[in-house]
Image (cartoon, helix red, strand yellow):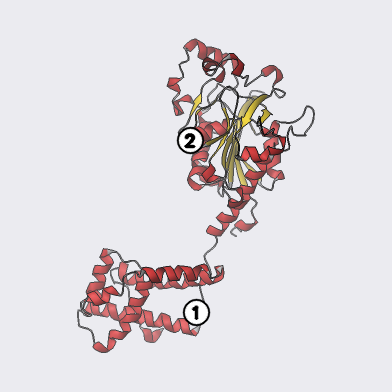
């Protein structure tokens, strides 16, 4: 029995991270992410980081949202890393300092970049946290610093340098970021911001970050050293309409007071709340677009009579074409129903026009016949205005009727007239 998509809770895909435990690989996702997704009304679906999963992403449909979070460094060959200017000795030092992050995981890269691109193609809500924000930027053509500690200080005075990761005070470490006005981040943390400084303290667990931001994105926050700490696509941000494409370099889900689940700021969970809102709205929109086709329309007597007349009209046109005989003048009026139907519902290709010329235009002095088949712009506008006033049920019924009529046209025009049009007398 087919599952009713309307009863499925919104599904958020989250890719796991792999770690070694008791000499075996284990996949995991941070519980804070899962807790917030569930708390705001969606269901987290964990995509395992195992070989070959990047080829099976369609099996996780329906996808209503994607949340990508922590993980290892992204393979530098996926962006313009050759311009980093770092020496082999510096790379070796980076690998020693950040051993848990510098082991490239190409399978995870493939899975997450595939999901990010899928979200961008379909406008599926996407929230990227830390590595997830970097994946989003790379997927859109942006680049990354291979190591903030080595690359950014070279460009900044001492007073603007920032410690972006502190292994000695891992969860307690914070640094300042300046929030950009009139961005989602501004609205979420508004009650905690001094309007003059526009600053909050955020946690920091990363040694890489956005270097060149992809063109489609707008920054939402900067660290004092100039590093972008948050960005979004303003053209794809409207949670109420199911639109949400965003990346945050910091972890708002982990910004909590010591030995407590209380957040540092009331705005900390807002990214997840608004993301979940977009996911729920996207699911509703998707369900509407993929709803089962309407049941066959039961025509009233008047519409049934109209259908018979149109079928009869096409039947006469077919006979004229296949027999090569001229048309009985008494039949001319019966061709008008088919012509009017095509005029109001069909934009004809050149090939179809040529066929219709063979079927009847020469009999009816060509130009006058096809003049009636041209789309009338004024009538088209009036029809659209009328349809905007119709209910969903009325539009569905209308669409079913014209779909049926369109199939009749297709049989006559596109199957080279090999089909047989039922005799009207047997209808």
**Residue on which the image places disc 1:** 299
Percent position of residue 184, x then y: 61, 40
Residue 71 shows in the view: yes
Residue located 53% across and 41% down the image: 233
Decide: is 308 above or below 147. below
Residue 3 shows in the view: no
Instruction: Compare residues 15 and 344 and report the one nearer the observer.
Output: 344
Instruction: Compare residues 164 and 4 and report the one nearer the observer.
Output: 164
The nearer-to-camera label among 1 and 2 is 2
> On residue 139, which mark appears?
2
Q: Residues within 10 Å of mark 1 (few under 14, many from 20)?
A: few
Q: Quadrant of the C terminus?
A: bottom left
Question: Would residue 313 appear left or right of 147 to someone viewing this image?
Answer: left
Q: Secondary structure at mark 1?
A: loop
Identify the mark nearer the N-term, 1 or 2: 2
Percent position of residue 160, x then y: 60, 19
Query: In the displayed image of the protein, which residue is found farthest to the top?
Result: 89
Residue located 51% across and 72% down the image: 397
Q: CA distance from mark 1 to mark 2?
A: 51 Å
Instruction: Compare residues 265 and 208 and report the one nearer the observer.
Output: 265
């Amino acid at each position: 029995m087919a599952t009713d998509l309307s009863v499925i809770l919104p599904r958020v895909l989250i890719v796991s991270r792999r770690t070694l435990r008791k000499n075996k690989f284990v996949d995991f996702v941070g519980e804070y992410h899962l807790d917030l997704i569930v708390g705001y009304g969606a269901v987290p679906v964990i995509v395992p980081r195992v070989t070959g999963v990047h080829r099976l992403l369609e099996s996780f449909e329906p996808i209503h949202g994607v949340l990508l979070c922590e993980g290892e460094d992204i393979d530098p060959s996926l962006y313009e890393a050759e311009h980093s200017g770092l020496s082999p000795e510096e790379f070796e030092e980076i690998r020693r300092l950040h051993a848990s992050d510098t082991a490239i995981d190409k399978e995870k890269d493939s899975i997450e970049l595939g999901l990010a691109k899928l979200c961008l193609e379909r406008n599926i809500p996407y929230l990227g946290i830390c590595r997830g924000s970097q994946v989003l930027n790379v997927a859109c053509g942006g680049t990354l610093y291979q190591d903030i500690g080595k690359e950014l200080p070279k460009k900044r005075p001492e007073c603007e340098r920032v410690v972006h990761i502190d292994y000695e005070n891992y969860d307690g470490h914070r640094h300042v970021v300046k929030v950009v006005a009139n961005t989602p981040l501004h609205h979420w943390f508004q009650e905690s911001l001094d309007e003059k400084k526009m600053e909050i303290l955020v946690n920091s667990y990363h040694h890489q970050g956005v270097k060149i931001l992809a063109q489609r994105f707008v920054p939402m926050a900067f660290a004092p050293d100039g590093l972008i700490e948050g960005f979004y696509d303003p053209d794809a941000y409207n949670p109420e309409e199911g639109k949400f494409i965003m990346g945050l370099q910091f972890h708002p889900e982990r910004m909590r007071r010591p030995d407590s689940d209380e957040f540092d700021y009331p705005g900390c969970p807002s990214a997840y709340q608004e993301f979940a809102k977009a996911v729920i709205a996207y699911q509703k929109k998707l369900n509407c677009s993929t709803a089962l086709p309407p049941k066959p329309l039961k025509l009233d007597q008047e519409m049934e009579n109209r259908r018979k007349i149109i079928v009869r009209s096409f039947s006469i046109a077919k006979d004229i074409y296949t027999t090569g005989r001229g048309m009985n003048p008494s039949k001319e009026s019966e061709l008008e129903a088919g012509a009017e139907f095509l005029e109001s519902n069909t934009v004809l290709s050149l090939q179809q026009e040529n066929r219709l010329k063979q079927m009847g235009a020469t009999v009816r002095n060509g130009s006058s016949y096809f003049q009636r088949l041209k789309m009338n712009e004024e009538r088209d506008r009036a029809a659209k205005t009328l349809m905007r006033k119709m209910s969903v049920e009325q539009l569905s019924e209308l669409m079913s009727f014209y779909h049926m009529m369109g199939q009749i046209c297709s049989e006559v025009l596109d199957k080279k007239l090999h089909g047989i049009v039922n005799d009207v007398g047997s209808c």
